[in-house]
Image (cartoon, rainbow, N blue to C red):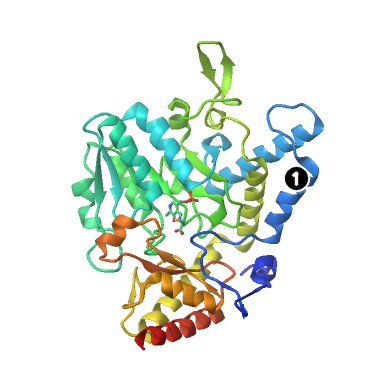
Amino acid sequence: MSPAWKNIRADFPILDQQVNGKPLVYLDNAATSQKPRCVIDALTHFYERDNANVHRGIHALSMRATSAYEHARERSARFLNAGSPAEIVFTAGTTDSINLVANAWGDENLKTGDVILLTEMEHHSNLVPWQLLARRTGAKLRYLPIVPGDTGLLDMAQLSKVLTPDVKIFAFTHVSNTLGVINPAAELCAAAKKVGALTVIDAAQSAGHMPLDVRAMGCDFLAVSGHKMCGPTGVGLLYGRAPLLDNMPPYRGGGSMISSVEYFESKWAPAPAKFEAGTPNIADAIALARAMDYLDDLGREAIAQHDEKLAALAYHRITTEIPGIRVLGPAHHRSGVVSFALPGAHAHDVVTLADQEGIALRGGHHCNQPLMRKLGLNSTSRASFYLYNTEDEIERLIAALKKIQKFFAV
Ligand code: C6P
């Protein structure tokens, strides 16, 4: 492990606080991660020293801001192993990235009878944009099922049955925010390619948690949220293969995305500028690049191992020490997300009582309503781990769950 792991918690100022009289245990990382000092400093530095609009001015500050913003694009391309910075569009996050593809690519390329393939575990952000697209174009939605039971694994035996030549686009999550399942992205992309379907990977829960290589995965598009990987809120990435971005029409119109404008006609700038209308989220994109440096100093393989070790320990301890509890997802080879349902206790009550112990969990349907219904649940409580969490915090979680179970048993 790199020396950067030493004193890692000291890098995150927010962790050093008490909640309800107890040291904070932050286990809501799948909702949003905390930010290291270097990312906070990058934001402050930009606003204190370099703040100006990009791609417009030719004064010193504007040139500095433009150079830092374009450096952030180049850094993002390296982070994902994209072929070139032109394949990176800055967006507001995963939701925004998926909407961009569904609108810009979808409206142009889909027609009645075409099929959009999704999986049964998709977050609403990778579901509703496709429903809207289906409504606009007459395309149909189809789903790759999960296997029966609580492992949440995709039923790969069904893949060839649902991935037929009428499928034009296959959008799936890399890591489920409710099940903790890590899907076989490269295998799914290879299968899609065989029938001529494009692929969109929702990497909201995997970027920043494990190495990501868009070329090795063989995807056409990949969507990322900065705030779940130590970066700021309000910024994210869309990776798109260059020929696809080049041929897609713009999604929004405005300044910066044009090469020339007449009263009745306009010509677009090349990608990625074509997709970044208006003043972009400059400071947050720059700070996101700093988060990427931070994560790579730690090593993304080491982060993945750390997440998996904590999740496997939490899974094991919860299933063996909390009788009757239902834990979702596989026992091994999982991300840092562990969802569970305590019979007789609503998830919101579990989360409220955990908060009394200083522990931040998330309770609810996690923007996964169809999956919840499929599993016969209305909600779960969810602990989600990241690089600064510790085994001692799992000890605190288990103690709290025992107390909560006792409370509901009386
Ligand atoms: N999941 C969670 O608590 P945005 O909001 O655009 O940054 O990310 C949306 C999104 C898309 N896909 C997956 C798999 C996600 O987990 C999320 C966000 C959060 O699970 C908030 S609902």
Looking at the picture, how far across and down is residue 173, in whole percent? 38, 52
Q: Image quadrant of residue 279?
A: top right
Q: In percent of the image, x 68 and y 69: which residue is there?
A: 3
User: Percent x, y for residue 75?
Assistant: 62, 45
Quadrant showing the C terminus: bottom left
Under mark 1, the amino acid is: Tyr
**Which residue corresponds to the image point at 43% horizontal and 42% vertical from the top-left?**
98
Q: Does the residue labelled 1 lie within 8 Å of ligand 1?
A: no
What residue sits right under mark 1 in the picture? Answer: 47
Residue 332 seen in render: no
User: Farthest residue in the top direction?
Assistant: 263
Quarter of the displayed picture in which ligand 1 can be seen = bottom left
Q: Is mark 1 on a helix, strand or loop?
A: helix
**Residue 321 horizontal side relative to residue 150, left or right:** right
Left or right: 286 in relation to 349: right
Q: Position of residue 216 (x, y in %)?
A: 44, 48
* Viewer can see residue 306: yes
Left or right for 307, reference 105? right
In this view of the protein, which residue sits in the foreground, 400 or 84?
400
Residue lying furthest front: 410
Pick the quarter of the image with the N terminus: bottom right
Instruction: Tally the marks.
Output: 1
Q: Residue furthest toward the left?
A: 161
Within 10 Å of the Cα at label 1, are there few (<14), some (14-19), or many (20+) other Cα atoms? Answer: few
User: Which residue is rendered at x = 66% and y = 66% of the image?
Assistant: 14
Q: Position of residue 166 (x, y in %)?
A: 22, 36
